[in-house]
Image (spheres, rainbow, N blue to C red):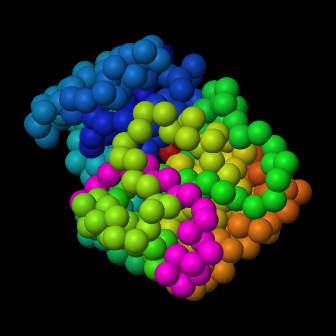
Amino acid sequence: MIPLLYSLHSGNLYGTERMALATAQALGPEFQVVIIAPEGPVHGEARRLGFETIIYRSPLQYLWAIRPYFAAHLRVLSINTRVLHSLAAAVWERLYWRKSANLQVVHGGAQEHLSYGRKKLLRYFGVKQVAVSNYVKERLIANGSDPGGIRVIENFLTDQRANPEIIRPVFTQSGVRRVLIVSRLDPIKRIDLLMDAIDLEPTLRSIEFRILGSGEDEQRLRQRASEGYPNVHFLGFRSNAAEEMAAADMLLHLCSEEPFGLAILEAMAARLPILVPDRGGASDIVVSEVSGMHFYSNDARSLASQLHFFKSASADRLNQFAQGAVKRLLSNYSASYGARQYRKLIKECWA
């Protein structure tokens, strides 16, 4: 069986790692899956799913860890998240004269050079870049990557996560009363924009805003909330995010530079209406007036206006948003849809 080497820059279980496991599950029946990452919880979850794992602690150790697969197999599927990974695969495929599908999955991030700038080196080694959104593709091109070497394959949910056991019941009363935000608490995520909107529209103080996540901006944001926003609650990291979504009335996403936004897909699965900025990867996921609404990015007045709309929206309107969200999830962000796109790209690499 052809090996699928999925190499990660982190051993955590955040969005990038969860998407790696989802992709491995979608392609797993056709390949021998090996998850390669630094030490961390991703290894335990990968083994629970039946995948082999390898821990690496240095670039050299990584290089030697993948060599046996190229030595023993005529074809190798290499999916990577660091430039180092793709360059190492390129070394072995040339030394052993192997036919390799060498893919670099680009999830993007806050640091332009690290997230996008370095990727332009891959154009000289025949590496195909998989951008998780059109926004990511735009940033790659702006930073020197070859447009012809980029394919957009958006993130998706496994069948299990797309059909969660706990979902929000249908709305029977008008208006949202509990809004959930799932985000790192970093400056670029613009959590402060929420409190700016509340200042502009005091009636929003009747809505409870629950924020899951942590980050470098956490202390400053908590301090501001304690000084006049008793309806804004910072809950830190929570392992029960699914339960929080099912108990919420809406998901709010604030970052206009988000490469994608996996929590948005999870909110769709939970049958939540969604409000996102009109820029960034999140804006492509939500179809305005169908699965949710947009607000003008980084504009507190526009955010306040849209939150006020949701505050008084009829139950029928909110249910329409929820149903539109789950329909879009199942048609555009299912595991079967994502796997088909990966298979097509892999065949092109091996043609």
Q: Give residue 286's position: percent from left, percent from top.
A: 68, 62
Instruction: Decide if residue 113 is on the left or right side of residue 282.
Output: left
Determine if the magenta segment contains residue 198: yes
Q: What residue sits 53% from the left and 49% below the top?
A: 262
Judge by depth and name the residue closer to the eye, 155 or 77: 155
**Residue drawn at (25%, 61%), measured in percent from left and top?**
219
Q: Position of residue 346 (x, y in %)?
A: 54, 41
**Residue 182 within the magenta-colored segment of the rendering:** no
Which quadrant, please, contains the C terminus?
A: top right
Query: Residue 314: image x %, image y %?
Result: 85, 62
- Vertical order, 95 against 72 (above or below): below
Above or below for 92 versus 2: below
Q: Is residue 10 left or right of residue 194?
A: left
From what the image shows, is residue 345 above or below residue 116? above
> What's the residue at 32%, 51% (across, down)?
214
Boundaries of the magenta span: 197-216
From this viewpoint, which residue is outermost toward the right?
316
Which residue corresponds to the image point at 62% horizontal and 75% vertical from the top-left?
Answer: 203
Q: Nearer the viewer, residue 59 or 148?
A: 59
